[in-house]
Image: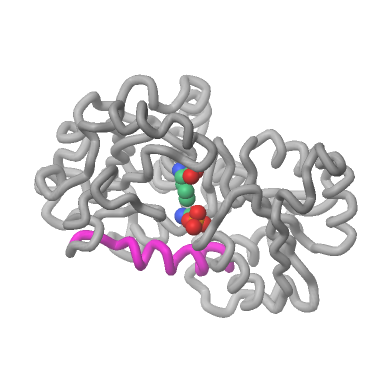
Amino acid sequence: MRSFLEIDDLTKSELHRVLDLCLDPNPPKVLENQGIALIFEKPSNRTRNSMEMAAYQLGGHPVYIKGEELGFDKRESVEDAVATLSSYYKCISARVFDHKTLERMATLGLCPIVNLLSDAGHPMQALADVITLVEEFGDLEGKSFAFVGDGNNVFRSFAMAAGMLGAEIRYAGPGNYRLSELDKDRLATIGVEVNEFDFAQEAVDGVNAVYTDVWTSMGQESQTEERKRAFEAFTVDADLMSVASSDAIFLHCLPAHRGEEVTEEVLDGQMSRIWRQSENRMHAARGLLAWLLGEGQDDE
Ligand code: CP
Ligand code: NVA
C-alpha cells in the first residue's frame, strides 16, 4: 500500500513518472465510479479546488470533510475515523496540523493517504512548483533556485523535489527559522544539499528562480509580530530580483501577503509565474493521483 506523505516517498524515477502523468491531460481514469475524501483541519483555496477538479477529471467523486466534523481524537480516534472512511473511499487525503496524524493514517495500511499540507511538508505544492520550473526551463539539472524567508513546510518539500531533479537549492533566512538538522540529514539521504546564506542577496545571486512563502504559516498566528521582526530583511523586492539571473522567475505558493514577504511589484510583475504555479496545482493533483492509485499500487 503506497501513500504520499512527502516527496521522498517517491524514488527519482517515480518522481519523473509522476511528472509525466501530470503533463498528460488524459491519464487513466483511476477513480472511475469511486470517491476520494478530502479532510481539511485548516482552510484552503488552491488545494481543495485543485484536488476536487483532479478527482473529477479522473472519473471520481471528491468529498470535502471539515476536520472539526471528524474531530480526530476528540469525537473518535484517528484510527477509527480512517477505518470507517476507508470503507467508502479509494483514497483519503488530508491537511493536518500535526504530520504525525498522517503517519498514523498511513500506518493502518487501509487505503492510500495523501498529504495536503502538514506542519512538516507540502508535497502536492512541490509537484506543481517543479512542473512550473520544467515548463520554464526544461531540464532542471544544473539550474539554481533560491528560497528566501521561512524554512518551512513548503520549502522542505520544494527542496526535495527540485533537488531530486538535479537543481542547486539555496536558502536565505534567519538562523532560527531554517530547516532542522534532521530535515537536512533526510535531504542528504536523497542526495540533496541546501546551501544556506545569511543574506538574501547572497542566496539569490545568479539564480534561475526565487521562491518565497508567508512568514507566518497556519497555526503559528500567535508568533506573527515576532516573525515580522525576524524576517524584516528577507522581503523579496525588485532590488533583490535584479541580482538573480536575467531569465529568473519568481514563485510563491500563495496565499501571499503583499508588502511582507514579497512586494506587489514582484508578485504582480513580469518575472512572476504565480498563476501558472497555481493552475499547475490541478495538473499536479491529477498526475499524482493517477500514479498513486494506478501504477503506485500495482508495484506492490
Ligand atoms: N498553496 C496552497 O496550498 O494554497 P491553499 O492553502 O489555498 O490550498
Ligand atoms: N506555509 C504555509 C503554506 C500555505 C499554503 C502554511 O503552512 O500556512
Residue 164 vs residue 120, the one in the foreground = 120
Horizontal arrangement in the rendering, residue 214 relative to residue 237 (left or right): right
Position of 72 compared to 256: left or right? right
Count of marks overlaid on the render = 0
Colour mapping used in the image: one colour
Above or below 29: residue 299: above
185 w.r.t. 214: above or below: above
Q: Nearer the viewer, residue 74 or 14?
A: 74
Query: In the image, what residue occupies the spot 88% across and 49% down?
Result: 83
Task: Report x, y in % for residue 280.
Answer: 44, 66
Most common SS among magenta residues: helix
Q: Is residue 276 shown in magenta?
A: yes
> Is residue 54 part of the magenta span, yes or no?
no
Image coords of residue 85 (percent x, y): 84, 56
Q: Which residues are magenta?
A: 271-286
The answer to whether residue 175 is seen in the rendering is: yes
In this orientation, does residue 157 appear? no
- Nearer to the camera, 162 or 96: 96
Q: Nearer the viewer, residue 19 or 257?
A: 257
Residue sitting at 72 percent across and 59 percent down?
A: 65
Residue 291 picture location, percent across and down: 64, 62
Residue at 72% x, 74% y: name it.
60
Query: Which of the 4 image quarters holds residue 64?
Result: bottom right
Q: Position of residue 270 (x, y in %)?
A: 17, 64
In the image, what residue occupies the spot 54% across and 67% down? Answer: 50
